[in-house]
Amino acid sequence: MLDTPLKHLAIIMDGNGRWAKKRGLNRTKGHDAGAETIRTITTYCAEHSSIETVTFYAFSTENWKRPKLEVEFLMKLLDKYLQKELPTYQKNGVRFQAIGDIEAFSKPLQARIQKTQERTQHNQNLTQILALNYGARAEIVSAVNHLIAKGKMAITQEDISTHLQTPYSDIDLLIRTSGEERISNFLLWQLSYSELAFTPTLWPDFTTKELATIIENFSQRHRRFGGL
Ligand code: FPP
């Protein structure tokens, strides 16, 4: 029996570019392949009963610094992904949610995101969160500013937790692919007690088999949350 079941899994998907380079392909091919991996892993999570939420870091506030063509490609890919994914979300009972500042995106892409959120809002099997134009420090500052606007004079941890875009949902396990071992401004508050797993596998090569192994290792860990 697990100390704590795996309810919220978060993933930093890294290595699309290197995956493409290794094959002599354009980086965009790596992102295409990466989008397929999101599909496969989400379906696996929907079938894995204890997982309630899976959060993917899809576009960070830093990703705007990439070449314009790559950014444009990623925006188009996101739009295509959401359009293609809708029937699967419905079939698998997946609720889609975005976190991050999507107002920086084009109006049609914002509309696609809103529509996908609305259409899937009653699905209950799994919540898939895509972090889009997301940065954790900005999320925390925004929560604090909301509290100030409400006239709060003293702020508790509970206040911040409930004003984040991912309302009070601590992460149980964070996976980062491609061998990098950094958090990169992802869900800083929610990761406070998370278990961390780093794998050298590049994101497009990440499989459900490897995920199952990581989850199995996670289930052997005794999470003490600061206690004994
Ligand atoms: C990192 O690879 C990946 C990202 C930029 C974020 C994840 C994006 C995708 C999986 C593309 C599809 C997304 C959606 C939501 C449809 P990298 O380019 O940083 O790889 P590198 O470090 O090897 O260059």
Image: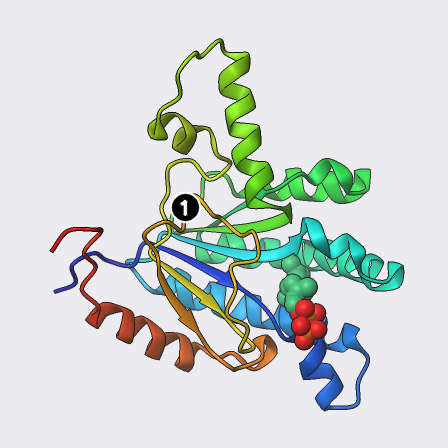
Which quadrant is the N terminus positioned in? Answer: bottom left
Q: Secondary structure at mark 1?
A: loop
Image spot of residue 127 (x, y percent): 45, 49
Decide which of 81, 135 is in the foreground and name it: 135
Decide which of 89, 188 is in the foreground and name it: 188
Image spot of residue 157 (x, y percent): 35, 30
Q: Is residue 188 above or below residue 49?
A: above
* Amino acid residing under circle 1: Gln
Residue that mark 1 sits on: 190
Decide which of 193, 87 is in the foreground and name it: 193
Q: Residue at x 32, y 54 (%)?
A: 7
Which quadrant is the C terminus positioned in? Answer: bottom left
Q: Residue furthest top?
A: 151
Q: Residue at x 48, y 57 (%)?
A: 91
Asked which quadrant contains residue 63, the reply is: bottom right
Q: Residue furthest bottom?
A: 23
Asked which quadrant contains residue 196, the reply is: bottom left
Left or right of 105, for residue 217: left
Decide which of 35, 58 is in the foreground and name it: 58
Image spot of residue 50 (x, y percent): 28, 58
Quadrant for ligand 1?
A: bottom right
Ligand 1 closer than 8 Å to label 1 CB: no
Left or right of 57, for residue 222: left
Q: Is residue 27 above or below residue 151?
A: below
- Residue 118 in sight here: no
Left or right of 49, for residue 228: left
Q: Is residue 158 above or below residue 228?
A: above
Image spot of residue 146 (x, y percent): 54, 20
Q: Residue at x 36, y 46 (%)?
A: 170
